[in-house]
Image (spheres, helix red, strand yellow):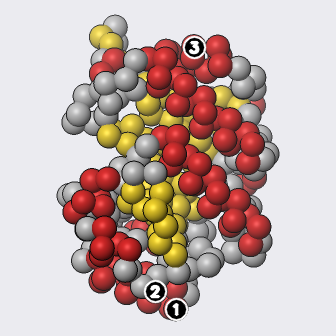
Amino acid sequence: MLQVHSIILWANAKNDEFKTSVDRAYALIMALKEFGTELSPNYLTAKRKKDAKPFDYTYETLEELIRKGVNKEGKTVFADLGYSVSFFSSLVEQDSAGIKFHVGTSNPKFIDTFIIHLPQTCPIYTDTTIGERLINLFKKCVDIFDPFWGCLGNGVNARRYDGYWGDTLPTSTHWINYFGESVTKQLSVTRIEKCPIYKVEKLSKGYFLQLKTTPIDDTNEGDIKIQANANKYFGF
């Protein structure tokens, strides 16, 4: 089974002004563009890729797209549920990253999300420079998005744990993780800082955790053991 990897960030609802949400989304867009063509949001998502329109990377266009992406049913608008926009990077399916934003949520029962599905052809296991670039992008996006949790996860691996999130904590650790303020409070700073894994680093309002030097391969028993040991340590 193809192991598809995704950067996933989840943020609590905020009572931000609309412009603040657009500013945050635009900063994320620029971070992806700076990363390179592999993850650049070059096209707006359409029912058929051949009908997809290029994205011009202007603030004004993004602002208009976000306004149009307001949550609504028929003519009833639910602005407190936020705004959704999606992009992709390439017209070649296997080379294309999928990028999804949901920003501007103010209803505390819901969250904002930022998700990047990496291209199928991304050499995440064989090219160490890609891994380093992804880690730097992840950290930059954490600073911009202010999530309560995030990871770079493996979709096949996540099925072992019935998804990414339980009631109040993650269901598992992943190759790289971000534990924000609320997760850190539940697990405790001391517990996180003493976790016996490859790297633990203070980042933004929480902690960045990296299990090993390379991404988790769900077919590798050694990788699964490292993950299971970290999960046991945190009680996931």
The residue tagged 2 is: 226
> Is mark 1 in CB contact (under 8 Å) with mark 2?
yes
Q: Secondary structure at mark 3?
A: helix
* Label 2 crowd (10 A; few <14 / some 14-19 / many >=20): some
**212 in relation to 20, above or below:** below
x then y, percent, for residue 152? 53, 61
Pointers 2 and 3 in contact (CB under 8 A)? no
Q: Position of residue 77 (x, y in %)?
A: 33, 13
Tag nearer the camera, 1 or 2 = 2
Q: How far is mark 1 from mark 3, CA to CA? A: 48 Å
Res. 83 visible in picture: yes
Q: Amino acid at mark 2?
A: Ile
- The residue type indicated by label 1 comes to Gly
Is tag 2's residue or tag 3's residue first in the polypeptide sequence? Answer: 3
3D distance between C-alphas at marks 2 and 3? 45 Å
How packed mark 3 is, by other alpha carbons closer than 10 Å (few <14, some 14-19, many 20 or more), is few
User: Which residue is tagged 1?
Assistant: 222
> Helix or strand or loop: what does disc 1 sit on?
helix
Which numbered dot is residue 64?
Answer: 3
Callout 1: few (<14), some (14-19), or many (20+) C-alpha neighbours within 10 Å?
Answer: few
| Mark toward the start of the polypeptide (1 vs 3) | 3
| Residue 129 location (% of width, % of height) | 77, 67
Q: Mark 3 is on which residue type?
A: Glu
Residue at 32%, 53% in the rendered image: 181
Q: For residue 25, which quarter of the picture?
A: top right
Is the residue under label 3 in contact with that under label 1 (CB below 8 Å)? no
